Image (cartoon, rainbow, N blue to C red):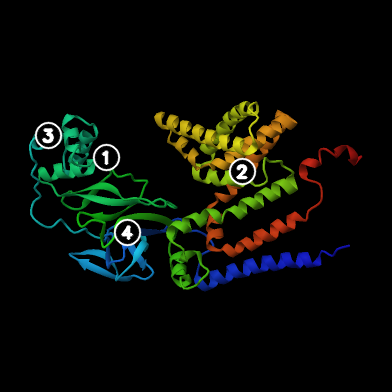
Amino acid sequence: MESRAPFLVLIALLVAAGFSAASYRHNTYDIPWLPRTDAQVWQIEARVELQTQGDSSHVYLTLPPEQSNWELVNEAAAASGWGFELETSDGQRRAHWTRRASSGGQMLFYKLDFTPAETAFAEPPPSGPEPTFAWNEPYNTAAQDLIETATPLSADPQSLAVQLLQLVNSRGQNANLLLDQYSPAQTVVQLLRTSGHHARVAQVIPLEDGRRRMSLIDFIQVWDGTTWRIIDPRQGVQRQDQPILIWQAGAPGVLDVVGGTNSRVSFSVLSQTRSGLLVAQEKVGDLVLSLYNLPIAEQGMFKLIMLLPIGALVVVLLRVLIGIRTSGTFMPVLIALAFLQTELLPGLVSFVLVVIMGLFIRSYLSSLNLLLVARIATLVIIVIGIISIFSIISYRLGLIEGLTITFFPMIILAWTIERMSIIWEEEGPKEVFVQGSGSLLVAIAAYLLMNVKVIEHLVFNFPELHLISLALVMLVGRYTGYRLLELKRFAAFKD
């Protein structure tokens, strides 16, 4: 009989190694065990991409100005083979990369870490004379009409900006004339300047955890005599539930490239725990094997990847110990991962509707006698069509949650429909219901565990804890006893 001692020793070593490595990381680099939600570190990474033709190149990236509600705690540039320096002119900081000769695609990074400021400071007033702006006809007449309409309805520069924005967004005749020349934000700024108020277009980044490849959004800033008020041109006011960071206000432009073409800049945002993690990242930064060394966009991706072992552990526990049957072994984990993007209820409703519609269409495809590869490809195309229709209908009805259905993996949905259709044909609708409901039950259980903030914090900041997950999976994998749901089947034998 094979001895279980070596296996148990291996399990013990995995658990000990995982816990010891995590403890070492905590004690050495001060990484906290628990997330601190009352204070955050927002990491913003600017990714500059351009094409060079072999000549000398200069790349200038405007950096965020000092802001009363944010405190810059760390910043760093990264670009292999490029020279770098920080420049400051008239209080505006810019990152400046240089290279003597380069050819082909180039990628430059600049990362900044911000925390909410504990004490706000008075923002500097606008410099220079009272603003003026001269319109050419017929734009001057349209601008004056809009100002005369909005001024009696306002009490200060901020409320005037809101009233002007409402008139511009209403797309009347005068507004459309001005919008042919300027964007909504630029139009309102020019109207405010025409009426004698200091105003400017500010390009901002909405701070949303895990967002990648974002572009700057135009906001409006107006001076009310004491501070710069910021207004979202799409909402009419600043959304209080959405923090933003002003990246650029006024001139110069965000990106200026000499000696390159097809240049663009995109931004990625990641939220981290304040203080403990901030210090830890600075200490761990020199280590080769550290997730903190990855670009922000890739770190956001790994925050999801690191949750997959937790979902796999849930699948093993529920299938091996409980005996829940699922459609596909680890398909519930992928569904749970999609639920993290869509939220549970909208994702659950969307998934069920797509699968039900797909099953009806798949029943028709059976009569066409298509080969497996062609049938799966057909289902993929049909699933994309169903999701597109659902998204359009949801948007038209004002159900923004319905747009999150695009987070579901198309291929997995197609394979799920194909597998359930085959089960329907071979074993009947009852088995489809059993395996389908079992898959959703396991997916919901995995989602509930993967969505716990403490677990999300631990698996990303202490990846060595996955050794403990591995040990649990291996330990449960040796279980050969009755599953919980099988006890009912053999209940008659207990007598």
Question: Relative to 48, is 485 on the left or the right?
Answer: right
Name above or below for residue 104 compared with residue 424: below
Instruction: Name the mark nearer the viewer: 1 or 3.
Output: 3
Amino acid at dot 1: Gly
Amino acid at dot 4 = Trp
Distance (Cα) linking label 4 and label 2:
39 Å
Does residue 217 appear anywhere in the picture?
yes
Q: Which quarter of the image is occupied by the N terminus?
A: bottom right
In the rendered image, which residue does mark 1 sit on?
236
Q: Is residue 184 left or right of residue 283?
A: left
Q: Where residue 453 sits in the image (x, y, percent)?
A: 52, 53
Q: Name which of mark 1 and mark 4 comes first in the sequence.
A: 4
Q: Amino acid at mark 3?
A: Ala
The residue tagged with tag 1: helix, strand or loop?
loop
Residue at 34% x, 50% y is 215
Name which residue lies at 74% across and 48% down. Answer: 320
Neighbor class of circle 4 (other Cα within 10 Å; few <14, some 14-19, many 20+) is some
Find the distance from the CA under tag 1 to the CA under tag 3.
21 Å
| Nearest to N terminus: mark 4 or mark 2 | 4
Closer to the chain start, of discs 1 and 3, is 3
CB under 8 Å between callouts 1 and 2? no
Q: Position of residue 173 (x, y in %)?
A: 17, 29
> N-terminal of the two: label 3 or label 4?
4
Residue under the point 49% across and 55% down: 301
Q: CA distance from mark 1 to mark 2?
A: 40 Å
Task: Give residue 142's mark.
Answer: 3
Q: Nearer the viewer, residue 414 or 229?
A: 414
* Label placed on residue 70: 4
Foreground disc of the pair 4, 2:
2
Circle 2 or circle 3, nearest the eye: 3
List the residue tagged with mark 2. Answer: 443
